[in-house]
Amino acid sequence: MGTAAAESFLRQAREVREDELNRFSARVAAQLQGPEPGPEAADCLQRLHLVLAASKRPRRLDAGLVELLQAVLCSPRCPEQIQLLCAAVLREMSPCDGLRLSCEGIHDAKLLSLVSSVLLAQEGEKAEVSAVGQRVVKALEGRLPVGQSSRYLLPILSNVISLAPEALTEEQANVISKKMADWLRYASIQQGVAQPSGGFFSNPRTRQPGPVTEVDGAIATDFFTVLSLGQYYTEDQWLNMQAFSMLRKWLLCYGGKEVNTPNLGDKSEMDGSVMPVVSTSSTSSRLLPPKERLREKAFEYCQRLIEQSNRQALKKADGDLQKACLIEAVTIMDIICKQDSSYVYRAASFLKILHDRISGDASYARALLPIAQFFLNHGEMAAVDSDAIYKHLFTDIPAQLFHNSSLAFEFVLFCKDNSQLFTETSSIFRQNFPNLFKFLAWNSPPLIAEFVDILPFLLDAGTAIEIFHLLLDLPCLTAALDVQMRSSSLPSSDKAACDPTVKPAACLEAFRSPLHRSAFQYLLRIESSSEDAQERLIPLRQLLGSLASSPRVVQCADTVPVLLELFFSVVAEFADAPLINQLVVLVLQRSDQLYEIPAFKDDVHRVLSSQLVMLCKLRPALIVELSKELLEFSGTVSNIQSKEPIFTHVVWAIGEYMSVSYDKRCTVEQITRFFETLEAVLFEVTQLRPQASVPSYAPRAITVLMTALTKLAARSQDLIPRVSLFLAKMRTFVQSPAVTSVYCEEDREEILTRATELMNLLKMPSVAQFVFTPSVDVAQTRFQKEVNDTLPAALRMVTRLLEPAPGFVPG
């Protein structure tokens, strides 16, 4: 069945109605009730299984059919294919009403495997899982009848320990550990024999099987592993491969209990020149307790796999298998060393050699992660300098393979799981954070959750500013990576350097141009840099503007606001006064130095405005210390339209914190300077013009400007007449035809109401001073905080006190 046909069938399967399913179920039942179900029954069961598997909601079958499926599954005369399909249908019905299957009394290994798979799929209680586990272990403990195979039971055992590790007793775990050790180490190195077809020309005198071979075709002289090759495999070879597939899970569940760790004070073990050797003698090995013996054989098996992986693969498929086995072997070695530290020294030496061998081959990049994990866990005990391993990992891999999505996820997950360990043991993690962000720039949003966990560990006083810039330039980094990839794929003839005297017109030309080379190099840097290259990035952002609508760039831009909010919440926990001041200045500067994606700029402005207020609350004294920068920003009228959220919050912060209550250095002259600047801005905004040229400013910006001016006047009462006169003119402003054509009635009413409230408050200067200018001893009291938080309510209350009640006639 082709891909299109398969998709069409799945679509139809999802749309099957209940009445159609019932009719089809009756047809399946009729086929199963025959003397011996044949190909037509198999076809019906396959279709029924697909319908159930494709359905987005649980489907229920007729109770009679469920009973019939169980009976056919357990029938000794039923063909194996029919049994497999019956089990598959029953598994898809989980949880299945009317299930009466049981493992008890089943002696056939294949049937026990099928029945157990159905029972484990029912999502039952741990007791049911445990019962399956007990029956499977009992079957594995004894000698199976002739023709039966244990290899059908190991997948079930693997599922049992995944669902309920406590299902096995200590004694049972020891029995299986002993068997696994034998399966891993003592499988035959001779190939299996082909099963006779039973035809007329079948020859009972088959020749003796030859030895298994290595992946390069050489005859295997050591013990059998999953990488050994043969045309046919023996029973113990199948068990060997299955035992390895579940070895990691088994060791994690049962390998680490009652382990005697070595005495770390023993000089012979701590001396790097003396390496403990585990005996490979069969006799001495069999005297070890089962779990220790399994660790020994598992370690030898992993060493053998790593040695085999050094051979040249004949086919790509073989090469992929080698790499997967290599990764699994290193991971298992790490687990063994955690459970018994006497293995650390041999493993460290072995894996250091392995790293040196494969680190130059990009196809082995995934294998470098478990190697690095091993040295993170055991490098100190092994007395090995691991920085070279970490350096290569964080330098070369992200820069070369950021576009490999599966590797990106594994790499970032590795960083997430080890963030604390890295920050405690190595500076390389923080030093190479620009490289790490290439994974996010190219593979967002799938990696956003992991970076939310990683970012706090990358931040400190030394990296905060650079990470702030990097987050704002993240979509620009995505565009630069896109240009870099396209440039690397060009023919050599097209990679010639551009004329440095000619201004490049396109991204690819700019990438090769000496005019922009340093800017690209900075944006694509591998390590953290103290260089301030923001001015050089301004023209580069413009050049990369042609990629702003790229789906990958837009997706990356969508992740920035979340990370920015996290950035500020983390920095707030450790930032000192100079860092807070520097961040405020950068917020003002970078607000108009962003990649040209309108939605991105709006979202970033929204986040920066709210975080600016947070920084001001954290350190109100910055209003006085940064008065020059704040005056320049708040005095620029164009900022009201291009950066309205930031402008509005800056003006609010000035009105709120430019007070001696927050900073004794605040003077009347400074208050007056801020007042005059904001007054000029409000005058420009509210100046009446011909109707065709009236710009539309956000009503919130106008009301915040009026409120800030009122607050400043309350702290320097010589300014009260000026602001009162200004507020009195607001009625004329909002009622002018030019303004009514631009602002809706609701906006005009909002502006006029706030002007009236503020004007009424200024009629009582002492009340205004208390509301807007708390004394030093009450500035931080709960009452004053509540007054500030509920300022609109306070204004309305004063207005009601001053305005006459309805029907009142002055006498």
Image (cartoon, rainbow, N blue to C red):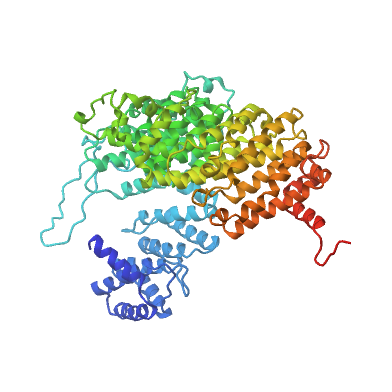
Image quarter of residue 505: top left
- Quarter of the image that includes the N terminus: bottom left
Image location of residue 412, percent across then percent down: 45, 39
Image quarter of residue 219: top left
Q: Residue at x 83, y 37 (%)?
A: 777
| Residue 797 shows in the view | yes
Q: Could you say which is closer to the camera, residue 429 or residue 636?
A: 636
Q: Residue at x 72, y 53 (%)?
A: 756
Considering every residue shown, the one lying at the far right of the view is: 811
691 is higher (above) or lower (below) than 311: below
| Residue 222 shows in the view | no
Q: Residue at x 60, y 30 (%)?
A: 629
Q: Residue at x 20, y 29 (%)?
A: 492
Image location of residue 210, percent across then percent down: 20, 42
Tell me: 390 left or right of 326.
Answer: right
Image location of residue 230, percent across then percent down: 23, 44
Tell me: 426 left or right of 115.
Answer: right
Image location of residue 517, percent across then percent down: 35, 26
